[in-house]
Image (cartoon, rainbow, N blue to C red):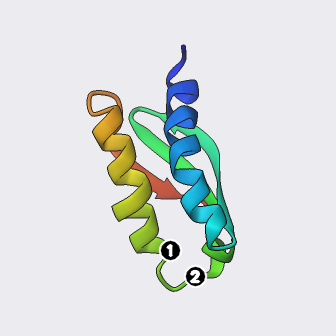
């Protein structure tokens, strides 16, 4: 399994929480431990999107893939 696929599996666990609030997340790329994602729907324009990204998505990825992930960045 590639790192891209591993990250996608973790995002699949987070995705229902985002979708419940009218948003979603798209995995764009994983390079050198940096995960690049696009927040969509309500999450894309939400004032709390940075907190969602860091405290939700990044935290989940760091917990499940600590030796492979360094950071999550939002791509616009």
**Residue 31 in picture, x, y percent from top left:** 48, 34
Q: Nearer the viewer, residue 41 or 19?
A: 19
Task: Check the picture and name the quadrant holding the N terminus.
Answer: top right
Find the residue positioned furthest to the right: 41
Q: Which residue is mark 1?
A: 49
Q: Secondary structure at mark 2?
A: loop
Q: Nearer the viewer, residue 68 or 61?
A: 61
Residue 53 vertical position relative to residue 13 in the rendered view, above or below: below
**Residue 32 in picture, x, y percent from top left:** 41, 32
Residue 22 visible in rendering: yes
Task: Check the picture and name the quadrant holding the C terminus.
Answer: bottom right
Which numbered disc covers residue 46? 2
**Does the residue at mark 2 contact the one at mark 1 (Cβ under 8 Å)?**
yes
Q: Residue at x 56, y 28 (%)?
A: 4
Residue 76 visible in rendering: no
**Residue 70 in picture, x, y percent from top left:** 31, 42
Q: Residue at x 58, y 35 (%)?
A: 8
């Amino acid at each position: 399994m590639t790192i891209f696929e591993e990250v996608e599996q973790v995002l699949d666990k987070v995705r229902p929480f985002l979708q419940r609030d009218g948003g979603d997340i798209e995995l764009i790329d994983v390079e050198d431990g940096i995960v690049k994602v696009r927040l969509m729907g309500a999450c894309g324009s939400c004032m709390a999107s940075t907190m969602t990204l860091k405290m939700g998505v990044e935290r989940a990825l760091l917990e499940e893939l600590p030796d492979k992930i360094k950071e999550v960045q939002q791509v616009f």
